[in-house]
Image (cartoon, grey):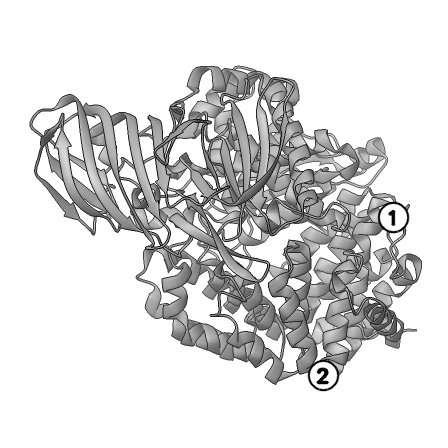
Amino acid sequence: MGKINRFYDTFHPNHYDLFINVNRADKKINGTSTITGEALSKEVSVHQKFMSISKVTQDGKEVPFEVDEKAEAIKIKLITDGQTVISIDYSAPLTDTMMGIYPSYYQLNGKKQEIIGTQFETTFARQAFPCIDEPEAKATFSLALKFDEHEGETALANMPEIKCEDGVHYFEKTVKMSTYLVAFAFGDLQSKMTETKSGVKVGVFATKAHKAKELDFALDIAKRAIEFYEDFYQTPYPLPHSWQLALPDFSAGAMENWGLVTYREAYLLLDPDNTPLDMKKVVATVITHELAHQWFGDLVTMKWWDNLWLNESFANMMEYLSLDHLEPSWNVWEMFQSSEAPAALTRDATDGVQSVYVEVKDPAEIDTLFDGAIVYAKGSRMLVMVRALLGDKALQKGLKYYFDHHKFGNTTGDDLWNALSTATDLNIAEIMHSWLNQPGYPVVNAFVEDGHLKLTQKQFFVGEGEDKGRTWQIPLNANFDSPAIMTEKELDLGDYKALREKAGHALRINVGNTTHCVVKYDETLMNDILAEVEDLDSISKLQLLQDLRLLSEGRESSYAEVVPLLDKLKDSKSNLVNNAIYTTARKLRQFVTPDSDAENYLKQFYNRLSEEQVKRLGWDVKADESDEDKLTRPYVLSASLYGGNIDSVRAAHKLYQEHEDDLESLNADVRPYVLINEVKNCGSSALTDKLIKLYQTTSDASFKSDLTAAVTSSKSESELEKVVSYFKNADIVKPQDLRGWFASVLNNKLGEQLAWDWIRNEWEWLDKTVGGDMEFTTFITVIARNFKTAKRLDEFKAFFEPKLDQPMLTREIKMDTKVIATRVDLVEAEKVKVNQAVKNLFIEE
């Protein structure tokens, strides 16, 4: 496939005067896009999609044009090249695809309402106004917005409103920016405002379906985050305001539009009095992620989509760095270890995975770049690695250089490495190219041979993989004497006994778990570690389980060997260790058949892991308990219910009865498990209907999530059929939430066939409804995450292989076929041994 034809090569816009008129009643927009810029040719192309073009003028004179739908282009023949003004009159539809300019729907006092918002990343600005819709084509924008306005409605945009005349809202000219960051919205909104110490106005906006207090948390985090970034980046926030807007319908988590950040409601608004701490952390990291982008992505933008990681990886790292400063007691780097690290390591171990830097050969491939586990999680791990090598002072110095030299411009990855290199003697570019420009990561083998401690590196695969002899520059972070960075394939560290005696403790590589690798120790070294396992810190225990889990998936170890270690660590009071315990324990479910003897032993094991912890923590949340206990409770309650613990079942049912008339008032830390237990053990058609009704009427995103988990866990096939029947009813299940509902039903042993049949039967409808969205392929990922039998593998291939010619789906289908095939082989080879290891815990007693 050849090079992408970039429209910026023929026309360089400098400024847009936009008039956009939105008619909600007719679901239409019309307007004029007037572009001042430099034509490098007498034939130029301007992006459009789904538009009707009525007239094109150059410097006031009509010129001929042709609309090319396939190229999403208006091809214009100009009178002259050079500096010019092109004006395009157009009309276009409002859509319900959550792209371009679109309505968001919500319920207020039992009536359906709507607000209008925008989503232009990646290539959807061209659905809103004719433009050069490429990141490098930065320009300034003056927006004039008209709409069928009702009294009391609010209009928002990237910049402050200057005036409103004859029903037209005029906004200040923007700074120089990319088209995908332009945004506006309007509707019946409530808001709360504050101001940073440097004078930036900060606001949170939402529909009036929400309680006013739900805006408070976001307002506080946003204000303090902007203040932190101004200090850390040593670069002022470049706009007069920063609005945070919650949209009832939003395909992604959030979008970093400059000055008008848009969010899915669940990731901005929360009840400060009854939201679990882990959800508060998630919302806070989403806000700090988007605000990190206001500099890294908005002020300085990637030159082309192949450097998307420049935006996302950096913001992903900064969300944790900033929140750790804002709320140090939250220990958010532990959250990084339990979410970003395993996501990246799991995805990146499958042969065929994309590298962080990916060449884009077809516009249809752009949205496939948004692989959360790679561009976000792996990329951020790379930058955490860079931060560990540099330290914060050097990192800040390098970033200031980067912003000073590239603000309002576009960059590539090497521009960042060159900037950081001004603050260090390390060759950052050389180190990072080995990680960003090739897929996968190494397994570091540590072993004693002929009395010498040796290390080797090779690419680690889960499943079949072609070893292409790749090497990485690996920061070892060893607790023995060793080089800082391992560049070769094999390293001899010298006499093991002498090294061990000098160190006084067991060897561990990648201390702190900041390097993107797994470590495999030989029996001598592993036994040495296990003898000291109780003395390890929480991150080291998590890392040990994480590496053993991955090595077991890659058939370089066995889950059978991990089972006794889970039992040994089960009384840990660390949330991080418990996350690792139950993440690993969940993997053991793939080896059992539902309702078999093996599953009965596994349930006993879950009960054994959780029983004392449940007794210690209880079902009643205490006001003065530690954050560790609050975050550990969900793991052990869920495990206890899976284990069928009768005391837990009774305690959950009792709580349900006490709050039956006001389920939302249940403490959010235990609420999902109370509701799941009630549906599983006391379910009825009336209960399903009650919970679905509550789902439709509540504005609390956390409660909605709990209700989804509950109704999809039913043990009644007829009730699950009812739930699946709601998938296409947007008044119950919004398209933005459909993947979560689908995944939950698929994960239910009674619902797997129902969900699988549904998606095969309704694929065309699904493609039409959310198919253009960057997260569409994750429906395939969700399926692959669940399937584990040869029969399901055959069905998966039969359905998806005919779709391999669709560029947006190709990589995901190939990857997930391997994921399922690998799991099928693993289960077949290991199930007897693993299930026996679980059973042995009870036989030996």
Q: Is residue 426 above or below residue 775?
A: above
Image location (x, y in percent) of residue 485: 61, 30
How much space separates mark 1 and mark 2, taking CA atoms?
A: 34 Å
For image coordinates 39% across by 28% down, the residue present is: 177
For image coordinates 65% across by 83% down, the residue present is: 716
Mark toward the start of the polypeptide (1 vs 2):
1
Q: How packed is label 2: few (under 14 Cα within 10 Å), some, or many (20 or more)?
A: few
Quadrant in which residue 321 is drawn: top right
Q: How many marks?
A: 2
- The circle on residue 285 is none
Decide if residue 82 is on the left or right side of residue 333.
Answer: left
Which three-letter amino acid code belongs to the residue tagged 1?
A: Glu
Image location (x, y in percent) of residue 548: 70, 55
- The residue labelled by disc 1 is 534
Decide if residue 734 is on the left or right side of residue 706.
Answer: left
Q: Is residue 390 above or below residue 684?
A: above
Which three-letter amino acid code belongs to the residue tagged 2?
A: Ser
Image location (x, y in percent) of residue 569: 84, 55
